[in-house]
Image: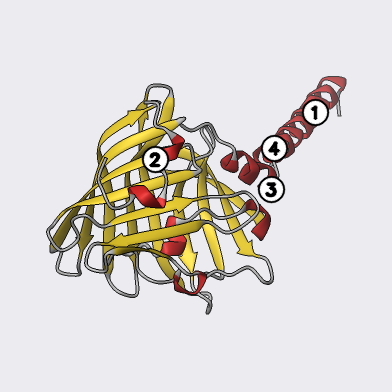
Amino acid sequence: MTIKMRMKMKTLKLKVVALICTMFLSAGSIFAQSADEIMKKVDIRVVPKDMKTIMKMNLIDKSNQVRQKDLKTYKLSDEKMMMWFLNPADVKGSSFLKISYDNKDDDMWIYLPALGKVRRVASSAKNGSFMGSDFTYEDMGDRKLKDYTYKLLKVENYAGKQCWVIESTPKSGVSTDYSKIISWVWKDDYFQMKEEFYNKKGTLKKIKTAELVKVKSYWVPRKFTMQDLSANHKTELVFDKIEVDTGISPSLFDQNNMTKIY
């Protein structure tokens, strides 16, 4: 073998080594953040100080027939939410209040004009349907970061966005209707674009997807869809009007304000 050939072989080997190193570094960069670190950033992502919306709840059956309910919603950061039902007549005047905490379960109340009083949603009832929709009261609440263990499964594109795919498994003793949840977390904003909910038998039960819109400097939901695979039914929450940072008073989020629409 000539000197020239040996030099070519040496150069080729160096290129192969460099390529292998690049591949390892690229793979490492994909998983540069742990699943726990990613979900911590999901938990503290920047959201509006407050938000007002007019919303449609579309209940869609297997024949694609739609029943629509109109709502008005107020939110204070991710801590408090009030919803009033405007239409149709059978739910008009009903309302829902949720207050979230870091270290304990959310408090939830519902007001139904037919009953004439505000009722707390018991923990044992949180797997029930929220106002006839495919969302349960548990789905309407906030999952506590400390209640789950997390595993980063892969990175993939969803709806044109690069996402981490993370499996969340409830710790022993945590009260939940699901055995695990798989989330597609958008890398740019740490928003959960898609979630798969598995029942206690480990079967995929429901799929939740989100569409976003930018309002001022915030990415906020424009639409949520929850599909119940076993019931062949889905619910859309469509936000027709969104206002952010309007100065809503924290005192509004009180049980005494559930019987009238603001």
Q: Nearer the viewer, mark 1 or mark 3?
A: 3
Locate the N terminus and report the quarter of the image it occupies. top right
Compare marks 2 and 4 and give the one earlier in the sequence. Answer: 4
Dividing the picture into quadrants, the one containing residue 11 is top right
Q: Which mark is residue 14?
A: 1
Tell me the tag on residue 36: 3
Mark positioned earlier in the residue sequence (3 or 4)? 4
Q: Mark 3 belongs to which amino acid?
A: Asp
Q: Nearer the viewer, residue 225 or 98?
A: 98
Residue at numbered disc 2:
252
State the CA–CA distance, disc 1 to disc 4: 14 Å
Task: Compare residues 21 and 154 and report the one nearer the observer.
Answer: 154
Q: Is residue 198 above or below residue 239?
A: below
N-terminal of the two: label 2 or label 1?
1
What numbered label is drawn on residue 49?
none
Q: Distance between the Cα atoms at labels 3 and 4?
A: 24 Å
Residues tagged 3 and 2 counted as in contact (Cβ below 8 A): no
- Residue under circle 4? 23
Relative image position of residue 147 (x, y in whole percent): 65, 59
Q: Few, some or many C-alpha atoms within 10 Å of disc 2 (few <14, some 14-19, many ≥20)?
A: some
Front-most of residues 15 and 98? 98
